[in-house]
Amino acid sequence: MAKLSTGALHWIRLHSGFLDSPSGRAELPLTPRVKALLQLALLRRSWERVAPQDPGLAEVTGTLGRVWRDPGFPPLLAAEPRYAWQFRLAYGALAPAGITDGPHPAVLAEVAAGGLLTPRRQSPFGSLETRYYADLAGVRHSLRPYRELYEAGRLARHGDDRPLDELDVCDVTHTVFHLTDFGFRAPDPGDPRTAALTGAALEHARDRVCRLTEATVRRGEWDLTGKLVLAQHCLGLDPLRTPSGAAGLRMLAAVQSPGGAIPGRSADDRADAAATTVEFFRKAYQSTVVTALATLTVLHGRPDAADHAEERSPAVRGAR
């Protein structure tokens, strides 16, 4: 797994600057480029926590620092109305450490003033994601507690007698990610965030995640398999030792390109030999970021420090 992780991170290090280059701005569609930068910021956050001296991290942070300081970037977050509030909230929450002179605090203030951080007509999964990023950003909100949001969601309500294909992999994995802070908070009955994933609920979630991993490996779905491998780790499993996790990591290692990329979201969506550089980048980027995030987190484990990530203000702690 170390080779898989090193290769994926190396590819990200070499290519992430393209997202904020003149050619990247010209050749990549706007909304996918914005989403890719937010995904890079999410990877950077975990990367900094487990390998802060990595030179690749410094390069990625430099790219993101320029983006977060750019006053022309926030309007791009709202280019696609369906994702505008999600992108703006994530942008505010994922500012690289030390970036205090950019426009993201003003964007966060606009999000809060717009009523997005209050109970509204949104799915439990959507509310859970909103709460996660609001807490990460340190802004006040009146969203429901994590346990309530989890128990209202699809993963908690999926019974043993129901078909596995009723579950959406992204819904399941991101529910686990947001409750466990992408693996940096262990399921703990004393933790208001992760208490929902303890006891019988933890065994239920582990069963669903492992079974979903088996299914995605069987279908050759590389991107989803990477997410599920990380979800196994978040739930206290060792993906190197679970049959489905080990099979998933072997699959990803087998398809990794010599340059370190995972060349598509799935075997059916693989970049072909005639793909241009930009076409290959578009095919490979998301799965490579997911693989880098999963393997980086699994390799370094869960830090012992009980700082619980980004509890930046008493307001956040009080909201829990």
Image (cartoon, rainbow, N blue to C red):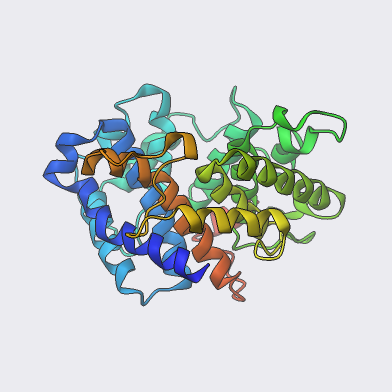
277 and 198: which is toward the camera: 277
Residue 94 can be seen, yes or no? no
The answer to whether 69 is drawn above or below residue 238 in the figure is above
Q: x, y (%) of residue 238?
A: 68, 64
Residue 79 at least partly seen? yes
Is residue 71 left or right of 265 when viewed as pictured? left
Residue in the image at 47% along x and 51% along y: 290
Nearer to us in this view, 42 or 315: 42
Residue 56 falls in which quadrant of the image? Answer: bottom left
Residue 307: x %, y % from top left:
58, 70
* Residue placed most toward the observer, 305 or 10: 10
Q: Residue furthest left?
A: 22
Q: Residue at x 57, y 58 (%)?
A: 250
- For image coordinates 55% across by 59% down, the residue present is 314
Q: Position of residue 84 (x, y in %)?
A: 38, 29
Please tell me which residue is depicted at 69% across the width and 45% down the height of the picture. Answer: 214
When the figure is inspected, residue 176 is found, relative to residue 266, above or below; the finding is below
Q: Decide if residue 95 is on the left or right side of residue 254.
A: left
Q: Residue 33 in the image: state x and y as whole percent.
A: 29, 38
Tally of numbered discs: 0
